[in-house]
Image (cartoon, rainbow, N blue to C red):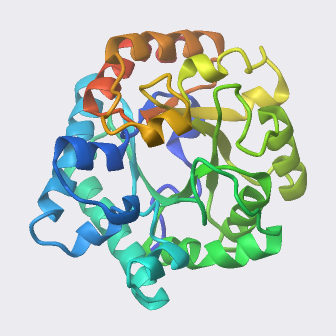
Amino acid sequence: MNLAGKYRDSLPQADGTLFLTDGGIETCLIFHDGLELPLFAVFPLLRDPKSRPLLIRYYERYIEIAHAHGTGFILESPTWRASADWGAKLGYSATDVAALNVEAIGLMHELRKAHETPSSPMVVSGCIGPRGDGYVAGEVMPEDAAETYHALQVSAFAEAGADMVTAITMTNTNEAIGIARAARKARMPVALSFTLETDGRLPTGQTLPEAIMLVDEATANGPAYYMINCAHPSHFDGVLGSDLAWTRRIRGIRANASRRSHQELNDSPELDAGDPVELGSQYRDLVQAHAQLNVLGGCCGTDHRHVESIALACKRVARTT
């Protein structure tokens, strides 16, 4: 296919205007739409005629919010689990997994073609998840092994014409460095998003500033920007320094709706959706304190209601900072 990404050489979110993205796609599809997602994998739905319309509607809800508030939108592909190891557990070969990553970017292109407007530019991002668990660091790969492992997805995204790569729920710096290096070789901009615990640290125990500075040092400031995900704002708002160089590298937030720990979320049979309005106000406080934050979405337990509240709370702040 070898398409050139429309925004690959100049990401529009880099100018500081507000961009929304989606919420917790897996928890939405499981708890709200009643779908079964073995191993939390969404990508098999791309080839399921019954479920694919639900997947499309999932994205369209968020696109409608972006249109209503005149914001940009990051179309994050449903490929968090679409890497070789997870694919094999689900019965897919590496070739099938690569093809499904290309198909996922194709769907994002279709959505952009149908819905992008001058006031709502839409960036196609290829989503990469961790090789292991998104909550637990587990066995940490060497950096070169991480680069080799994740190159399959990065290459598929580049071939399919994605604008960028976003690695979500990164639990350790080795894997983040490997992904950044794979993206650089593919000439793809990359955003790296770290999972944080209730103490504001990575699951490895490393502090957020240490992680960002280490990755930047190892990659010559390779990532376009960093993000925080899979933690409630109350878990990390006290960690962010005011006007420090490493803090300014963080541009995106995809917080959980719940204040619960990852273990508590794993053990709960019910979805904790928190309070969408309260979450919006907490995002507003973050954006007011850190003007560079302009890519806003959700993680576990969040849906279009939370993103709507975030947009309402933050759009004026983001436009005036």
Q: How many marks?
A: 0
Q: Splitting the image into 4 quarters, where does residue 89 fall?
A: bottom left
Q: Could one spot residue 318 in this view of the protein?
A: yes
- Residue 210, position as x, y percentages in the image: 86, 38
Classify the position of the N terminus by image quarter.
bottom left
**Residue that appears at 77% across and 59% down:** 177
Quadrant, the C terminus: top right
Residue 303 vertical position relative to residue 232 in the rendered view, above or below: below
Residue 198, x across and y down, in percent = 64, 26
Location of residue 103 in the rendering, given as x and y in whole percent from the top left corner:
33, 74
Q: Is residue 67 found left or right of 185 in the rendered image?
A: left
Left or right of residue 298: residue 54: left
Q: Is residue 119 above or below residue 179?
A: above
Query: Which residue is at the front of the view, 269 or 74?
Result: 269
139 lies above or below 102:
above
Q: Give coordinates of residue 179: x percent, y percent.
A: 69, 64
Q: Determine the residue located farthest toward the left in the rendered image.
A: 50
Q: Is 85 displayed left or right of 220 in the figure? A: left
* Residue 230 visible in the picture: no
Instruction: Determine whether 254 is above or below 305 in the image.
Output: below
Residue at image location 49% in from the left, 58% down from the top: 127
- Residue at figure coordinates x 34%, y 16% from the top left: 275
Q: Residue at x 79, y 39 (%)?
A: 205
* Along the viewing direction, whichever of 6 and 34 lies nearer the viewer: 34
Which is nearer the eye, 26 or 268?
268
